[in-house]
Image: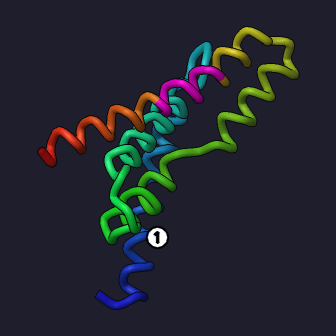
Amino acid sequence: MTTVLFILLVAGLGGLGSILRFVLARFSGVLPWGILIANTVASLVAGMFLGGGQPSAPYSLLVVGFAGGLSTFSSWAAQTGTFWRAGLYRRATYNAALNLLLPAMGVVAGAIIAFSLLK
């Protein structure tokens, strides 16, 4: 596979992840649940590639491309800031905490899934 084709595949999967994040972002209530889901799923995908040593082609395609497009640090940080500025301190705290905790759990779950499949 040529470098140009590989870059286009990473970009295409990144675009697919971004489109999915856009769709998920519409699911919102007391908290922006769609962004939380997007960040958690992207972290689960990343966790599946833990311990692989040097980044491989599947790593680059799925973690850098798809999961990179799907996840969004800036959106949840901006949403948390918006809650804070509006005086919704509890929502801001829950949003920040959940967007740190659940994606971290997603990484661990992804690693467990990958390691159990590779046994």
Q: Residue at x 73, y 9 (%)?
A: 90
Instruction: Check the image and report above or below for 27 versus 78.
Output: above
Residue at image mark 1: 11
Residue 92 visible somewhere in the drawing: yes
Q: Residue at x 40, y 88 (%)?
A: 3
Instruction: Check the image and report above or below for 13 versus 113.
Output: below
Quarter of the image that includes the N terminus: bottom left
Q: Where residue 69 appears, x then y in whole percent?
A: 50, 55
Of residues 30 and 77, the one drawn nearer to the viewer in this rendering: 77
For label 1, count other residues whose C-alpha is less than 10 Å away and answer few (under 14), some (14-19) or many (20+). Answer: some
Question: For the magenta stretch, what is the residue range?
Answer: 97-104
Question: Hey, what amino acid is under mark 1?
Answer: Ala
Residue 99 lies in the magenta stretch: yes
Q: Where residue 55 appears, x then y in whole percent?
A: 40, 67
Q: Where residue 82 appears, x then y in whole percent?
A: 79, 27
Residue 26 visible somewhere in the drawing: no
Q: Is residue 79 left or right of residue 105?
A: right
Q: Where residue 15 appears, x then y in whole percent?
A: 47, 61
Q: Residue at x 67, y 24 (%)?
A: 96
**Mark 1, secondary structure of its residue:** helix
Instruction: Check the image and report above or below for 73 versus 16.
Output: above
Quarter of the image that includes the C terminus: top left
